Amino acid sequence: MRSVILACAMAAALVACGQQAEEKIEAPAIPEGPGFTLTLEQPAQLTVPEGSPIRISEGDIGLRLQGNVANPNSQYRTDGASFALGLENEQAFSGQRVRVTFYARGIDGATEFHSAYSTAGEGNSGWRRLRVTEVMQEVSYVFDVPVVRVARDDFIGINPPATGAIDIQWIRVAVEPAGAAEPTGELRE
């Protein structure tokens, strides 16, 4: 309680002096339990195909992605920025409904981006359009993962917006429990 009062007093003193307190953005607690979570801190965590217009840099929070691929392929590693889920997770998600959740925001006018879940040859979600605002928030989609026939790894692909950029702090992929709430932020055609 004392630290809250002190923080409020410091913020009030800064405002009285004509200065503004620096906004600190904190992510909500990442859901616990089985699943795969990637906290984005280094651009090398994501791969981009050679010659891609996608640029990845450290953002104010997590990683900033910009540069859109026109007519991207959603198979294998995808034509977007991507990361592998690992063979252990590929087996865990095989034949399951999964939820892919991003903690993200739009920058410089970005209002959406696309993501795809790819099974590296045995099916994929297609590009899913996700709505973002200037405020960090969770956005997600669900996908029924086909049963694995040949282990090759699964991937999550990200195609940034055509205008502006997105900041992503973390991404989580987990099996969707029966009766779970509808995805947040997915724009349906």
Image (cartoon, rainbow, N blue to C red):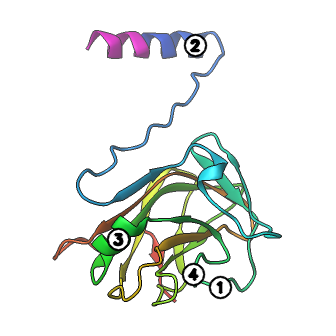
Looking at the image, tell me whether mark 4 or mark 2 is earlier in sequence order. 2
Q: Which residues are magenta?
A: 1-8
Which of these two is toward me, 151 or 160? 151
Question: Is there a contact, CB below 8 Å, between mark 3 and mark 1?
Answer: no
Give the residue type at disc 1: Asn
Tell me the residue that label 4 is attached to: 76
| Residue displayed at 55% across by 82% down | 127
Q: Indicate which disc residue 99 carries.
A: 3
Q: Is residue 78 above or below residue 140?
A: below
Give the residue type at disc 4: Tyr
Marks 4 and 2, how far apart at CA: 52 Å
Q: Indicate which disc residue 14 carries.
A: 2
Res. 131 in view: yes
Looking at the image, tell me whether mark 3 or mark 1 is earlier in sequence order. 1
Q: Is residue 2 magenta?
A: yes
Closer to viewer: mark 4 or mark 2: 4
